[in-house]
Image (cartoon, rainbow, N blue to C red):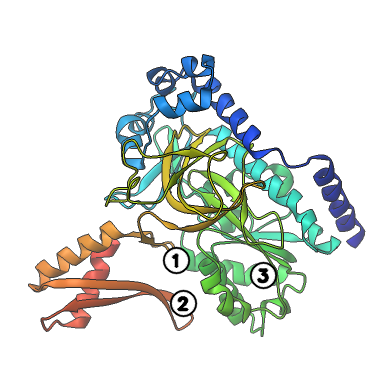
Amino acid sequence: MAVIGELIRKAIDFYGFVSSDPDPQEAQRAVLLQMLNKAKLTAFGKKFGFAGILDSDDPVNAFQAQVPVHDYDKMHADWWHYLLEGHQNVTWPGGQDYFALSSGTTSNSKAIPVTEDMLEAIRKAGMQQVLSLKNFDLPGDVFQKQILMLGSSTSLIQKEDHQEGEISGISAANIPAWFRTFYKPGADIAAIADWDEKVKRIAEEAPKWDIGSLSGIPSWVEMMLKEIIRYNRLETIHDIWPNLQVYTTGGVAFEPYQQSFEKLLARPLTYIDTYLTSEGYLATQKRPETNAMALMVDNGIFFEFVPFNDDNMDEDGRVREGATVLTLAGAEENENYVLLISTVSGTWRYMIGDTVMITDKERAEIRITGRTKHFLNVVGEQLSVFHMNEAMKKMQEAFAVDIKEFVVAAVQKDGAYINKWFIGTDHAVDAAALMEQLDAALCAA
């Protein structure tokens, strides 16, 4: 069987050799023109004159001049609510089958459209990641082993003419047929919505699998590995999966988890960072000598960069009108930028809320440096600053106290992650009662 894996590795080496990376700036221009052409007859395309932009001498500059910057609130209020109501040809041709649910820094969770074109782009990005494995020193047999992808439930919520779920669940529900041979935990377990039940089933089935690669949010994967080790009475995860060699991480920074994560291993893994958001698969690490990620410059996403400073950003973390906005061609290395994207899901000049730094312009490589706004999402709680503030207001009213400040952080307790709160008040408060009501308020948010 190792011969099969070696053949796969050689095929990846060959395809990686004959399909070199495109010139990032040329690829970006081509992507924008393709998207403008496809969306020119949508309501959004007609409103902002996509046909005229395509006919102009400089379509990129015309696009930036004619189309305003959007955040989620503006995009939803002006356009996406029509999609949720069942309208077609709004910001992208056709109707809408999926919406990715994501935590918001405003009062409600976000519902991001996910088109068939975006699902295809995510699949292509996954193939780019696979092809980049030629750059990593991996043995041939890893390519014939199973891949455990730990994500949210693939059992999506049916809402009239569309389905809703987290992007990892939507993506896993649409994996190509050829990949199902390698995919674990399999369709039945992946559909389980209850986290504890899902991890329990994985721990029970783990001895039957031969896992070579893991992927998922670090905190989720770490908790899963701990439960597998506990349930099967192991010393390390390599006692049950001796061929485990690769961990593809994403969602949050891996560094804070790495030390505790590696205590669960018998030997080091190859770590590969990815940048998959509800809005699309934006970047992936392609080289072992850096943890920076290469933008998907030729795959249905057009990137823009706003210098992250007070001249361009207001006190609420939004891009100011008239802000300086650069394309990849004009951006500089080692500067902080707010990332804007336009995509084949019908997001246009859209601020996703992340700040990035270009580390290698020639390779279009970036690192995520932070958020324009903050939220906690260590174990899927999707706790936004808005929800925290609203909960504090309720506590002040319920206990007749003045809460001047608070801090909340994710910490480990008894092998699991919890949110620990430090609440500052000059009044005496029954801490146990406040904790109970705070939990209730946050669960209801």
Question: Badge 3: how crowded within 10 Å, few (<14), some, or many (20+)?
Answer: many
- Identify whether 336 is placed above or below 301: below
- Asked if the residue at tag 2 contacts the one at tag 1, i.e. Cβ–Cβ closer than 8 Å, the answer is yes
288 and 333: which is toward the camera: 333
The numbered dot on residue 379 is: 1
Q: Earlier in the sequence, mark 3 or mark 1?
A: 3
Residue appearing at x 48%, y 39% in the figure: 326
Residue appearing at x 48%, y 59% in the figure: 369
**Residue for badge 2:** 416
Disc 3 marks which amino acid?
Ala
Disc 1 marks which amino acid?
Val
Residue farthest along the right direction in this orientation: 3
Q: Earlier in the sequence, mark 1 or mark 2?
A: 1
Q: CA distance from mark 1 to mark 2?
A: 9 Å
Residue 110 visible in the picture: yes
Choose top left, top right, bottom left or bottom right for residue 388.
Answer: bottom left
Q: CA distance from mark 2 to mark 3?
A: 20 Å
**Residue for badge 3:** 206
